[in-house]
Image (tube, coloured by chain):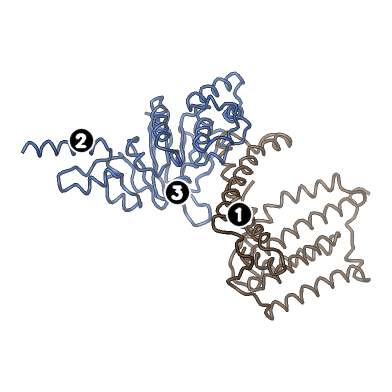
């Protein structure tokens, strides 16, 4: 287990076009493409979506960080694939397993793009602007802010328990699952303790006293924002339409052959 | 005496190219008691994580009891090298203190009767008998620290490493920890302590290693190292208060090489008597 999985969910300043977008636009981008990824369940459109995300990743020069996360979740996607292949729904199992795995990777990819290019401040701003109360956006922002801290804590906990002879690699599936307890209990307790501390510190500094808050930076939609928003919608609509209308629908709904006839 | 830990030209980085350890060379002999000091980010914790195989050298080598750590797992090394982490909250998880102490012993596959005996021994040693059925998570900070120490001592490793054992401990507990370290040392254990507490080092150690920016800037007798103004300034340490006093009082004839309170008292008394003699 490694903290590398979080590399692709941490903000990395690169200054390319995606960074300059309005947080609301980035947010809509993430929402639209997440819904699309969940909407399609065949291999072709999911592959298109995945490749599309790769294009954005590469053109924004975040391939390295993105790659680390994708590599880290590769094992998990293998689990998803084999579970679905073995115990998946009735019907075409190979097709189902492939598309579920692809769907997982694509979702990971879009979330990675969003978090790599959005600062926590922008994120909370975006949530505020779409009308979510400050307490909730703040909560969300704090959760995001603490992901790296949590990852670091977790690594230290793994180190501490390995120093006491815990061998995570050994044993069968059940034994390994049991070995997670010495890792998860300290993590949960630690974070609960920390959250109580944070809550006290917040109250001590008068959190929630004023109902209306002003912000340091004001966001306005630029031309690039509108352009990307337009593109997003066009692309999404054309994907959906092509899956409905012949002759494209045939390719879009193509199913992988059955493994065992 | 035989060598407990031998570090040879050790280089290490977490991120390619950003070296955290740059050519560390050191030897710790069996039964030695060594303090490792240095400011934040000097590489102390990274160094000690090499001693039980949590980290493996990128260049150079680390040998524990003559065995290169490269080919050994953490679990194999942990039997010989006990590492007490700074924050007990990173490891406490069991339902009772007893269970917490038994965890490592069971991981190493000791039979139940030995587990029981060792747990009993460690409970007594760390003054934890009355908490044996309590949840370790419900104890106070200082008590949790003692449980964490006990959970390592119970499997009786030959080499014991403490990361900041005195942090968050009151004066009384600090004295207890100092006593414990001396007792372990008397038993022939090799004791390595990472700490910022210069007074603690001055009063309790003979050898100190000072690190700065991934390198060892001084390694030797506590008195020589802590009273060396060059080492002190290079490593951003403060000298012990007694030493600082002695430096300021140099002109009246007090030796600048003092590190313990008792020594300063002796010097002042001597001067006082000499003066009265005149």
Residue B266 numbered mark, or none: 2
Chain letter for the part of the structure drawn in brown: A
Residue drawn where x is 84% and y is 63% of the image: A44
Residues at marks 1 and 2 on the same chain: no
Instruction: Please report whichever mark, 2 or 3, sits nearer to the chain's N-terminal start.
Output: 3
Q: Which residue is mark 3?
A: B43
Cα–Cα gap, marks 1 and 3: 24 Å
Crowding near pointer 2: few (<14 within 10 Å), some, many (20+)?
A: few
Crowding near pointer 3: few (<14 within 10 Å), some, many (20+)?
A: many
Residue A133 in the figure: left or right of residue A256:
left
Residue B182, image x and y in percent? 38, 29
Residue B250 in the figure: left or right of residue B209:
left
Residue B178 in the figure: left or right of residue B124:
left
Residue drawn where x is 19% and y is 42% of the image: B255
Residue A214, image x and y in percent? 60, 70
Residue A160, quarter of the rendered image: top right
Residue B262, image x and y in percent? 25, 35
Q: Which residue is mark 1?
A: A146
Asked if the residues shown at circle 1 and circle 2 are in contact, with their CB atoms under 8 angstroms apart, the answer is no
Q: Colour of chain B?
A: blue
Vertical comparison of B135 with B89: above or below: above
Residue B226, quarter of the rendered image: top left
Secondary structure state at the residue bearing disc 3: loop
Crowding near pointer 1: few (<14 within 10 Å), some, many (20+)?
A: few
Parent chain of label 3: B
Vertical comparison of A27 with B173: above or below: below
Secondary structure state at the residue bearing disc 1: loop
**Nearer to us in this view, B9 or A185:** A185
């Amino acid at each position: 287990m490694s903290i590398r999985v979080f590399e692709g969910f941490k903000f990395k300043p690169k200054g390319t076009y995606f960074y300059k977008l309005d947080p609301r636009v980035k947010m809509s981008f993430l929402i639209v493409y997440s819904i699309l990824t969940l909407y399609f369940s065949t291999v072709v459109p999911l592959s298109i979506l995945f490749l599309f995300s790769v294009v954005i990743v590469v053109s924004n020069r975040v391939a390295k960080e993105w790659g680390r996360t994708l590599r880290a979740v590769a094992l998990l996607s293998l689990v998803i694939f084999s579970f679905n292949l073995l115990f998946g729904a009735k019907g075409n199992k190979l097709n189902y397993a492939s598309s579920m795995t692809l769907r997982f990777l694509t979702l990971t990819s879009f979330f990675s793009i969003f978090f790599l290019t959005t600062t926590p401040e922008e994120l909370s701003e975006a949530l505020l602007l779409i009308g979510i109360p400050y307490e909730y956006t703040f909560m969300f922002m704090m959760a995001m802010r603490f992901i790296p801290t949590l990852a670091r804590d977790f690594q230290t906990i793994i180190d501490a328990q390995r120093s006491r002879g815990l061998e995570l690699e050994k044993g069968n599936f059940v034994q390994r699952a049991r070995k997670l307890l010495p890792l998860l209990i300290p993590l949960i307790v630690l974070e609960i303790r920390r959250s109580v501390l944070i809550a006290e510190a917040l109250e001590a500094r008068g959190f929630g006293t004023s109902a209306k808050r002003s912000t340091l930076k004001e966001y306005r939609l630029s031309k690039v924002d509108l352009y990307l928003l337009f593109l997003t919608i066009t692309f999404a609509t054309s994907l959906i339409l092509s899956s409905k209308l012949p002759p494209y629908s045939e390719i879009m709904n193509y199913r992988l052959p059955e493994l065992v006839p | 005496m035989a060598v407990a830990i031998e570090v040879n030209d050790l280089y290490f980085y977490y991120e390619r190219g950003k070296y955290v350890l740059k050519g560390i060379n050191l030897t710790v002999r069996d039964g030695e008691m060594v303090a490792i000091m240095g400011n934040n980010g000097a590489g102390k914790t990274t160094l000690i994580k090499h001693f039980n195989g949590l980290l493996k050298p990128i260049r150079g080598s680390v040998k524990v009891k003559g065995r290169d750590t490269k080919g050994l797992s953490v679990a194999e090394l942990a039997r010989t090298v006990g590492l007490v982490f700074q924050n007990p909250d990173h490891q406490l998880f069991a339902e009772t203190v007893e269970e917490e102490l038994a965890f490592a012993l069971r991981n190493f596959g000791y039979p139940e009767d030995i587990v029981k005996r060792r747990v009993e021994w460690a409970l007594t040693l760390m003054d934890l008998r009355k908490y044996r059925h309590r949840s370790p998570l419900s104890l106070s900070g200082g008590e949790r620290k003692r449980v964490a120490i006990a959970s390592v001592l119970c499997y009786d490793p030959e080499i014991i490493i403490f990361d900041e054992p005195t942090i968050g401990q009151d004066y009384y507990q600090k004295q207890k920890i100092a006593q414990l370290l001396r007792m372990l040392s008397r038993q022939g254990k090799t004791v390595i302590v990472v700490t910022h507490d210069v007074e603690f080092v001055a009063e309790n150690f003979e050898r100190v290693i000072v690190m700065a920016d991934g390198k060892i800037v001084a390694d030797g007798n506590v008195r020589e190292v802590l009273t060396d103004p060059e080492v002190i300034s290079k490593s951003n340490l403060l000298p012990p208060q007694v030493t600082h006093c002695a430096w300021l009082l140099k002109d009246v004839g007090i030796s600048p090489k003092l590190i313990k309170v008792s020594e300063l008292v002796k010097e002042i008394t001597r001067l006082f008597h000499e003066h009265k003699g005149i």
